[in-house]
Image (tube, coloured by chain):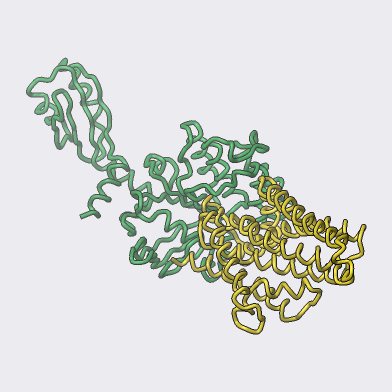
Chain colours: A yellow, B green
């Protein structure tokens, strides 16, 4: 446990002592801010559009602003998370520090979990900051709080799964670029699987990351969806462990 | 303290280490010699538990490094060939991290860190980023890192590489001073270094142990046949004959005109006698020195013999 914290602290320090964390946070806030503004604008236009005056009850903040906003954050995470995880293990190899880590009296599991938690914390800061825009909505509007909270739970679980995929990809290579491309590839495939079949009960549809997120955004928390993401996280970390452990035996 | 028994390591089809066994006792400083690619680093990596052996068993302080890695690794300080440094950390921050990794208790940690920084001469750069430091400093940070948990076993892969002559001497002194209750294995390709530091030497060649000998024996064996190098200014035809006629001289050969190689038998010191003969005959003595077969020559002999 103590070694998990040691690794976690070191990773956090290296995130924030290099420009990575700041650049990722900044880009994330700018892009999500632009989309938030666009959705809000279309909401305002819709409200004041005389043609839609009659169906006003169908336009609400949750439907027009918050749901698409969550969807957009999902896409931004798909692009940014491979960049957050790419160096986690690949860089230890390239910098020869893997030899220090793996000859220290520390379990491989502790190393992987410590690194994972560090990326999770950075990701946590990211989505907390993204809530600023939602807080603005809550202050000046009257959105339904339920779907917002469940949407955030969904985002957190989805992001955490992305990170687990990213750490696995980083365990496969010593090249950060390759790690980023591999994790981006895996995530994109898992994402577009949903497009071939949007029904959750088909196999491809079930494996799709985005289908499970839909429910959360609607305000529905299903045990199946939570289990999906949790098992995904576990699988990603386990595969990272296998990749590192088997490499030693070569 | 360290026992390597019947260890083989294969990388795919390539056999890097072929069934080697040796023991290192407490307090010994073992020098690992061998040409590049002989398997020195692989052997060290197996002892430190970085890579498990394909066959055989490695025990450190009684613990199997594969079966009981945490307890085995706790006793080891390891300086890899490629320095495991984080360029974005400060020296102090890095040693702090390594101390935490190696379970140095919090109450003695600051003391240990200052101690190793002092020992390795890096205290004056403790607040600087490692990435900005010179090779000499980086090498010494690597050594400090290996020492920070006060390990019973030190594994040093080429500890003096990249240092300037003054630092090399300091680090050698440091390593010598660390022995005593510790067990040290160091690899090097600077052969005199082994002479200066080690108590025993193992020469590895093509994944096998080509020679395992205590250093006393190596230098002792050399004593039995002593060779003198003699250089004179005026060389007459009969110089070789006259020197050969001296007592205890077994052979004289002229390498180049004016330069002779004098082999004497037993452990008799005939330098004084040779000098006197040369001076009395007015040949003009330029140089006279004992020519000992160095570790280099033994090394080359072993390596080329194995190469057949």
Spot the residue most to the bottom: A201
Nearer the observer, A91 or B80: A91
Picture quadrant of residue B87? top right
- In the rendered view, tell whether residue B217 sits above or below residue A190: above
Identify which residue is drawn at 54% across, 62% down.
A182
Q: Quadrant of the N terminus of chain A?
A: bottom right
Q: Residue at x 58, y 62 (%)?
A: A184
Q: Residue at x 17, y 34 (%)?
A: B249
User: How far from the left and from the top, in percent, is residue A208?
Assistant: 63, 74
Determine whether, in the image, residue B296 is placed left or right of residue B22.
Answer: left
| Residue B153 visible (yes or no) | no
Is residue B14 or residue B74 the one in the foreground? B14
Residue B20 in percent (x, y) is at 37, 63
Report whether B163 appears left or right of B228.
right
Using the image, determine if residue B258 lies above or below residue A131.
above
Q: In this rendering, does residue A32 appear at all?
A: yes
Q: Residue B39 sits in which quadrant? A: bottom left
């Amino acid at each position: 446990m103590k070694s998990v914290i040691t690794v976690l602290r070191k990773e956090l320090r290296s995130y924030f002592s290099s420009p990575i964390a700041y650049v990722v946070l900044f880009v994330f806030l700018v892009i999500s801010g632009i989309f938030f503004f666009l959705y809000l604008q279309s909401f305002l236009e819709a409200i004041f559009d005389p043609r839609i005056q009659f169906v006003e009850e169908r336009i609400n903040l949750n439907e027009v602003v918050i749901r698409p906003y969550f969807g957009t954050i999902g896409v931004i995470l798909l692009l940014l998370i491979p960049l957050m995880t790419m160096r986690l293990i690949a860089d230890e190899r390239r910098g020869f520090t893997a030899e220090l880590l793996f000859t220290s009296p520390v379990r491989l599991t502790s190393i992987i979990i410590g690194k994972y938690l560090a990326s999770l914390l950075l990701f946590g800061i990211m989505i907390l900051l993204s809530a600023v825009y939602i807080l603005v909505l809550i202050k000046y509007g009257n959105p339904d709080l339920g779907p917002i909270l469940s949407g955030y739970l969904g985002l957190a679980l989805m992001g955490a799964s992305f990170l687990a995929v990213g750490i696995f990809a980083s365990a496969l290579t010593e090249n950060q670029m390759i790690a980023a491309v591999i994790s981006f590839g895996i995530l994109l495939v898992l994402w577009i699987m949903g497009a071939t079949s949007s029904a959750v009960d088909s196999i491809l549809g079930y494996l799709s990351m985005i289908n499970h997120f839909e429910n959360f955004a609607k305000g529905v928390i299903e045990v199946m969806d939570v289990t999906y993401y949790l098992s995904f996280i576990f699988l990603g970390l386990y595969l990272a462990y296998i990749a590192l452990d088997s490499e030693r035996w070569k | 303290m360290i026992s390597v028994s019947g260890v083989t390591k294969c990388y795919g089809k390539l056999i890097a280490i072929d069934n080697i066994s040796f023991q290192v006792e407490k307090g010994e400083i073992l020098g690992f010699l061998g040409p590049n690619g002989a398997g020195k680093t692989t052997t060290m990596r197996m002892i430190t538990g970085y890579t498990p052996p394909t066959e055989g068993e490695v025990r450190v302080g009684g613990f199997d490094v594969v079966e009981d890695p945490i307890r085995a690794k706790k006793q080891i300080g390891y300086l890899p060939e490629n320095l495991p440094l984080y360029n974005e950390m400060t020296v102090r921050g890095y040693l702090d991290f390594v101390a935490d990794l190696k379970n140095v208790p919090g109450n003695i940690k600051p003391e240990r860190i200052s101690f190793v920084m002092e020992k390795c001469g890096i205290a004056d750069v403790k607040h600087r980023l490692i990435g900005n430091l010179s090779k000499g400093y980086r090498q010494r940070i690597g050594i400090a890192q290996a020492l920070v948990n006060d390990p019973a076993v030190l594994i040093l892969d080429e500890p003096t590489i990249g240092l300037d002559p003054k630092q090399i001497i300091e680090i050698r002194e440091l390593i010598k001073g660390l022995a005593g209750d510790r067990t040290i294995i160091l690899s090097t390709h600077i052969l005199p270094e082994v002479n200066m530091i080690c108590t025993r030497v193992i020469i590895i060649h093509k994944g096998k142990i080509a020679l395992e000998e205590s250093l006393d024996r190596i230098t002792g064996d050399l004593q039995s046949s002593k060779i003198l190098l003699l250089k004179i200014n005026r060389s007459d035809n009969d110089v070789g004959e006259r020197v050969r006629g001296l007592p205890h001289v077994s052979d004289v050969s002229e390498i180049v005109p004016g330069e002779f190689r004098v082999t004497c038998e037993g452990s008799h010191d005939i330098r004084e006698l040779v000098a006197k003969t040369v001076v009395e005959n007015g040949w003009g003595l330029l140089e006279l020195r004992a020519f000992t077969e160095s570790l280099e020559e033994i090394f080359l002999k072993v390596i080329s013999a194995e190469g057949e």
